[in-house]
Image: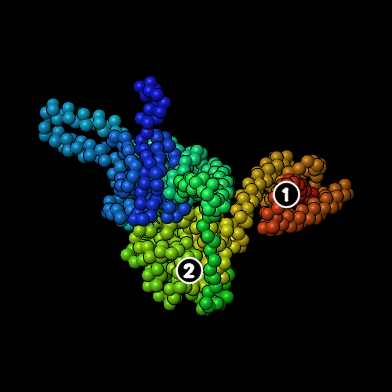
Amino acid sequence: MDSPLKALPLHLQFYLAMLIALQDITFEFGARAIVENASWHIVPGDRVGLIGLNGTGKSTILRVINGEYTVSKGSVNKIKNLSLGFFNQDLLSFESDESILNVGMTAFEQALKLEKELERITKELETNEEEALLMEYADKLHEFEVLDGYNMRHKTAQVLEGLGFSTADLERPYSQFSGGWRMRVLLAKLILQQPDVLMLDEPTNHLDLPSIEWLEKYLQSYSGAVIIVSHDRYFLDRMVNKIVELYQQQLHHYAGNYEDYEVEKELRREMQQSAYENQQDYIRQQERFIERFKAKASKAAQAQSIAKRLDKLERVEQVDSGPSKIRINFTPDRIPGKIITTLNNVTKRFGKLTILEGASAEINRGDKIALIGANGKGKSTLLRVIAGTEPMEGERIGGHNVVPSFYAQHQLESLDLNSEILDELKNFGSGRTEVELRALLGCFLFTGDDVYKKIKILSGGEKARVALAKTIISQANFLLLDEPTNHLDMNSVQMLIDALAQYDGTYVLVSHDRYFVSQTANKIWEIVDGKIKEFKGTYAEWEEYKKRQAENAKQLASADKNTNESKKKEVKNERPNNNNANNNSGNNNNKNNSNNNSNNNSNSQPKNAPIDKEKQKELQKHKRQFQQLEEQLARLNEKKASLETSMNDPQTYSDKKRFQQLESEYAQLGKELKQVNEDYEKAFEKLMELEG
Ligand SMILES: Nc1ncnc2c1ncn2[C@@H]1O[C@H](COP(=O)(O)OP(=O)(O)OP(=O)(O)O)[C@@H](O)[C@H]1O
Ligand SMILES: [Mg+2]
């Protein structure tokens, strides 16, 4: 805050620093209130997470702030000339044939205009050297410099690349990109505009992990206020320092990130619950009094006044017990053959971009596969290849009796906006009765009159739930799910996890949601160098495996380095080279220790000296030593393998103490192995040397 403000009383300072003030606002859709008498003040530098279950009205609040909806009570005030940036699904309707770099650069409207004028004046100056024109040129140039016009291309490219575009992409026309990638261009444009208040409605739906991380870093140094609607708790934890929760038609304010909110929320819930219970006790007691004395003349007046007081009492609401649990039978009608789909030697290219090259894989009945990895690796393409809807080279064999159902982002767009939810399901032709359909919709949390809502007015999460209901209604025994948790709030994600846990069929899903994948997959697939890499295990096991692999690679590199260094020393001391030893090194990759004595004896014999008795004896000794080391190594390796098996056992994960114990044993074993391995290699070299 600057000094003139400081002279004012604190509450006025705060008031003047405010960018937006929602004061006691009420907003309704027909009879349904979204907020009632709610207030919210947005100040510079705010990093606010706006949260709430699907359909509570978060996007609606942003539209109220944006001026698209008018409140029925209260006021929405903004400081003069406030610039607002609003990132939301509606942006998808934007079309352009310009390159994405140019689209991104439209953020610098003023500078672009100046650039054009400067070009015009330059041309004019070729024939007309009037001073006034020169002055105009100088003025405009100065303005252009102040606006940092020389950097606009570079800045735009930087932001686009941060959001996942390659340098070559920048010149490609916007119209060539898919919906998700277009959203990234528009996000880039918005953040380049640097509005005073940036409102982002579920930005991470369109991003993969590296881009999310980039956005987190970028926004950390953003000078304006940022309001983010997100269902991604990791993202919120890193991004925001305030939480506003839309809950029971009220805006509840919390300081801190999502984690702090959870702690505080629990406390508030407990307080609300006990206030509710106390009030209920009080009400019951008063009602008993009224009941008992209303007929008694001497107390009737008192009973009446108590009754009046009770009527006026502001009631404490009971804490929500949370959304209902899903309960549906997901057993498919038909059981498919053992093999669901086989891919043989599949190659898929988009122009120069190779997605798959000679890839093969098999999906078996009961597989619950998560296909993970960065955007652009071709996960959705592979899903379509599996479904048989994507042209490719190679062979795809569909299994017997397989009834697939595909859920993709564009499913949301393929819903008929003008139909009602129930009709949308009826028209889908599943042949189910209305009662069955209503039961299914109930499982997807559409109850009562909700089923008559028009698709057009549904929130993102509600639309996603209708599309998921459609996917499941098909009685398919093989589901292909592309990013099914996008738009879903945390409770709905849990609902989907529960639904999939009950699902008897087979599925392949693509998701960036680490929690969701960890709860739903028994196999992990990745696309690596055009091949499908399969890991048989859960996500937690896969992560552990990856970690161990990285550690092993590091150890291998350092073991190699050590071995090479010690070899170099030996080479210097004695012989020019020893290929055999080289070939052998690296068979086992392990750690270091203390007590060894096999390496510091005997290398004074000249090479190729006749083998005398002394030497024979030494040779025998070394052979024995070598053998012992070999056996020791085998034993240790066996122990290592068995430890790894135990550590991979999911039961071990659930027992933290046991896991820690195994981990420390594993680390100790690693050290021993490394040392024995080094000794072994040295002994081997020695032996080679002695044997000539
Ligand atoms: N024009 C409208 N007329 C009537 N109801 C509407 C209209 N637009 C939205 N709604 C309803 O208002 C509620 C709030 O919608 P909104 O899109 O704001 O939810 P949200 O909190 O953003 O949900 P999500 O997390 O799923 O994005 C929803 O139940 C929706 O169906
Ligand atoms: Mg929304």
Quick one: which residue is furthest to the front in this view?
297
Q: Residue at x 67, y 46 (%)?
A: 559
Q: Is residue 623 visible?
A: no
Q: Residue at x 39, y 72 (%)?
A: 426
Under circle 1, the secondary element is: helix
Q: Is residue 136 visible?
A: yes
Report the disc number at residue 220.
none
* Mark 1 C-beta closer than 8 Å to ligand 1: no
Residue that numbered label 1 is attached to = 657
Q: Position of residue 323 (x, y in %)?
A: 51, 57
Amino acid tagged 2: Leu
When the figure is inspected, residue 422 is found, relative to residue 230, above or below; the finding is below
When the figure is inspected, residue 399 is found, relative to residue 294, above or below; the finding is below
Q: How many marks?
A: 2
Q: Residue at x 35, y 51 (%)?
A: 28
Q: Earlier in the sequence, mark 1 or mark 2?
A: 2
Tell me which corner region of the image, top left, top right, bottom left or bottom right, holds residue 571.
top right
Residue that numbered label 2 is attached to = 440
Q: How is the image coloured?
A: rainbow
* Front-lying residue, 586 or 493: 493
Q: Position of residue 9 (x, y in %)?
A: 40, 24
In the image: residue 578, left or right of residue 206: right
Q: Position of residue 37 (x, y in %)?
A: 39, 44
Quadrant where the N terminus sits is top left
